[in-house]
Amino acid sequence: MEDEGFINSRDQATKPFLTLHTQLLAMIISVTHL
């Protein structure tokens, strides 16, 4: 498990992007369901 530190730092970097992506997806879904 020597990659754990790398995976953790990468996870920290991708978390804001993931939340932004999820918000965009939610907006698109709510718009298409109108």
Image (spheres, rainbow, N blue to C red):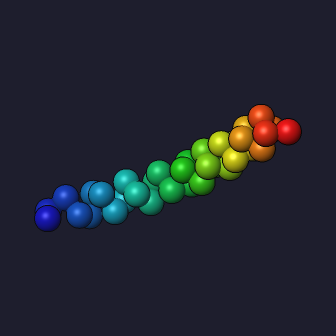
Residue closest to the far left: 1
Q: Quadrant of the N terminus?
A: bottom left
Is residue 8 or residue 29 the one in the foreground? Answer: 29
User: In the rendered image, which quarter contains the C terminus?
Assistant: top right
- Rendered location of residue 28, percent (x, y): 73, 38
- Residue 25 image offset from top left, x and y in percent: 65, 42
Above or below — where is 10 with respect to 34?
A: below
Q: Residue at x 51, y 56 (%)?
A: 15
- The residue positioned 19% from the left and 58% from the top of the image is 3
Residue 12, relative to residue 21: is it above or below?
below
Name the residue nearer the viewer: 25 or 10.
25
How many discs appear? 0
Query: Residue at the spot x=44%, y=60% of the render?
Result: 12
Horizontal and vertical percent position of residue 10: 37, 54
In the displayed structure, 34 sits above or below 1; it is above
Q: Residue 31 vs residue 15: left or right?
A: right
Residue 22: x and y, percent?
61, 49
Whether residue 32 is situated above or below residue 21 in the rendered picture: above
Furthest-front residue in view? 33
Q: Residue furthest right?
A: 34
Seen in the image, is 13 located left or right of residue 20? left
